[in-house]
Image (spheres, rainbow, N blue to C red):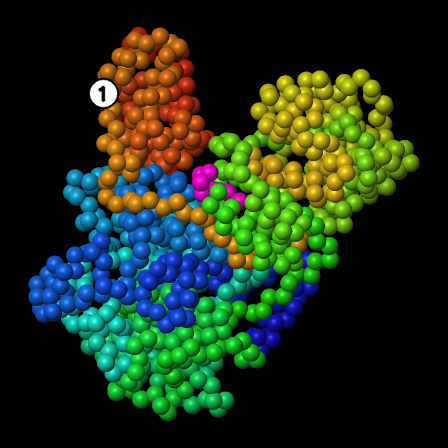
Amino acid sequence: MRDEVRGAMVRLLSGLNAEERSSLLALLQSEQPENDPVAVVGMGGRFPGGAHSPEAFWRLLQEGRSGITEIPKSRWDIDALFHPDPDARGKMYGRWGGFLEGADQFDPQPFGISDEEAARMDPQQRLLLEVCWEALESAGESPTGLAGSRTGVFVGLADQGYNRVREPGHLDDFSVTDHLTSVASGRLSHVFGFHGPSVSIEAACASSLVALHLAAGSLRRGESDLAIAGGVTLLLQPEISFHFCKLELMSRDGRVKAFDAKADGAVRSEGCALLVLKRYSQALADGNPVLALLRGGASTSTGRGVSLSAPSVPAMRRVMSDALASAGLTPADVDYVETHGSGTWAGDAIELQALRDVFGAPRPDGTKCVLGAVKTNLGQMEYAGGAAGVIKAILAFQNEAIPPNLNYSTPHPRVRLTDTPLVIPTQTQPWPRGARRRIAGVTGFGLSGALAHVLLEEPPLQSGADVTARRPVHVLTLSASSAEALAAQVERVAPLLDAIPEQSLGDFCFTANAGRAHFSHRLAVTGQTPAQLRDRLRSWRGEAPAERREPQRVGFLFHEEFLPQGAPGQELYATQPVFRDAFDRCTAAFAASGAQREVPAAEQTQFSLGFALAELWKAWGVRPAVVLGKGAGEVTAACVAGAMDLETAVRTLVARPSREDGAGYPLIEALPPFRWTDLAQTLEGQKVTFLIGMAQGEPGHFGLPGFLPSFRAGRGDWEALAECVARLYERGVEIDWRSFDRPYGRRAVAFPGYTWQRRRFWLHRPTDGSEPVELPRADDTAARVRAVPAQERRALLQAHLTAHLAKALRVAAGELSMNKPLILLGLDSLMTVELRRKLKSEFGFNLAVARLLAGACIADLAQDIEHHLAASSALAEGPPPVHGPGTEEREVIEL
């Protein structure tokens, strides 16, 4: 029955346009969010064996490779730590592990994190930031577009001792937030601006599955609209391995032999695995890829048993049965279980017996239940292991195959499986989509007694949206936080367009535009075909508009300078619902007022085109800071500005006399006085950078480099409009890309993620090899400022501020831009407190928090201080006394 209902729901949604679908789903979701299935819409991961993505992880699995190696000397000196005797103090007999390449590497710039903070931060937090970014990108969600959203964070991890890697002298006031496990989830929420629950979970090897279960519950209860769930482990200290060897839980040869008679222990490994979850109905409405449905799950504890850390058959049996009950499934529905499969002889026997008890009954249809064990490939990823198992199951759905387990030859003697449907794969098992829905279970068990089991269902087939009229021209945007990263992005994307079918080009561009972050270095190209976009990317030579650090102010201009050629607006009317609806409202207003007989047809068309274009631009997120008009365009401008409603505007056109002198129209008293000859001065006074023409025109007309027309003579509506959108985007105007594509039923598809520019961050070493910047003493600086001529003070103040910030951020002074916002340089709350205290002490200057949040840079602060000194007696009186921290300092910390 549930499948029939879901199938009917998919068919119903496929028959609606995007607006209708969004409205219906919002209504259904608001009624009963707990009945809405939870969908996995994105995933990201780093795995041993050089598998830095889920795709690379699948290749490792498919090829039957192991990511386990001898412990690298860059991590621990295994020769010094090795001893074959498990009782040797401070030694270990296991020489093996699964390690990540580049665990000391990080790209702080996209996150607004300073080099100093990056070096102090627990590398597990850094890894979570990058993988979270990648997982959101795979979901078609812009990592920088979720600020303020009810996005929950549920991550499993433990303190791996990075604070002990640091020398005692390197511990400071910032150290607590740099390595506490409870801060890791908060770090994600803070950096990305999430407003949902934020929870760090420490349940040993069950942590990431417990996190997934809690995240699904948060979505079902409606407290989160999107959730990040998973875990991370980095092996930074060897002490835990000493203890595991003493208990003889570690494999001696570095091979995990799950469920084999020769199983002799686990192998510790590291990695990160994160999943992005959303309610199914919302995922459909938002165009997210649906990778799997989370049918149900359970999280329990072993309770009182043989020992705290020992698993038990009844406990494992109970968690799997509870999960089946929550999903409304029977054991016979499950085709595949990704097991805990640690490779310990006793632990494997307990898990096999529980699996036999729950899933071992014969099946009338003869189907099998495959028991996977990803730890044979990766080792024990500990706090990330369960989420890695979920990613493996999703990859099996996608590739219609279950990869083989490694190191299995002889069945475990304690539990017989030959009379059950349970099989342990030694070769790839085909798992095609068919009439029977595919279900997979994933199990995790923690040393603390925590257990978790989740059940996944294959994603429903998604049919393409039924769109009768498609936009003929596409916009493809790329961006990065540096010119070098943007060039690398172009090199990655251009070749991909050779393989994109023309019917998929809209989805490809939608993913790039709506599903990726937008940085200050930008490129946008337009075209009708993949080949056109590819050629325009390849013709780019690295020339891009100057980096913009402030939001760009845009104006709308309604003018009559060009007589319309062709039939502007017809193409838009046929393919753009927002434009069509606005145009029809104008037509209805003219008809209702009888103005069709009194207002010339050309003037009616001009008004309707301008009004509809303005509504379209606003729907795309472009809101005018100023609205200007000439001739009949003044009436349109007044209507768009809200000075009159549509009906009043139509009546005004009827009463309008012919004006030839260029003066403002006197009936429109609500608009500020404006003369056409003062256009450039008016725009400069309003700090308007770009003026969008709401009629045909040519770029740069009226002597304004920032003039961009919506329509151009001799070009199709979409060709001109898309070019205008592209140029605005490149110059820093923010476009609502989801609204840009909302009428066309887009879906997120595979698209390259951000090109990281990683560098090594470890301990407190200057990133450029230079010595720390030495600051002049405060008294000396104040005296120097008093002594120099007024025209030289600003340069001196800039140098002084640069030196202070370079030391605080642990970068060379030459790396700091005078015009980049301090918050983008990485200035955090505690650094801000110190900067404010210093400026108060030296110059009597109170630095306002709002000034920093508004994007103040070094040049701005130097100017502010200079003006403060000129307007006060500070130069004569010297610096005021130093005061203790007050409410302003506390305010910064709270921010």
Provide residue 160's location: percent of width, then percent of height.
24, 55
Query: Is 870 situated left or right of 24 in this image?
Result: left
Provide residue 519's location: percent of width, then percent of height.
48, 40
Vertical relation: 204 (above or below) 637: below
Query: Is 155 situated left or right of 494 in this image?
Result: left
Structural crowding at the residue carrying mark 1, measured as other residues with C-alpha within 10 Å and reported as few (<14), some (14–19) or many (≥20) = few
Q: Quadrant of residue 732?
A: top right
Q: Which residues are magenta?
A: 477-486
Vertical relation: 544 (above or below) 322: above
- Residue furthest to the left in view is 88
**Residue at x-position 85% and y-position 23%:** 658
Residue at image mark 1: 777
Provide residue 892's location: percent of width, then percent of height.
35, 34
The answer to whether residue 584 is visible is no
Image quarter in which the N terminus is found: bottom right
**Residue at x-position 41% and y-position 47%:** 756
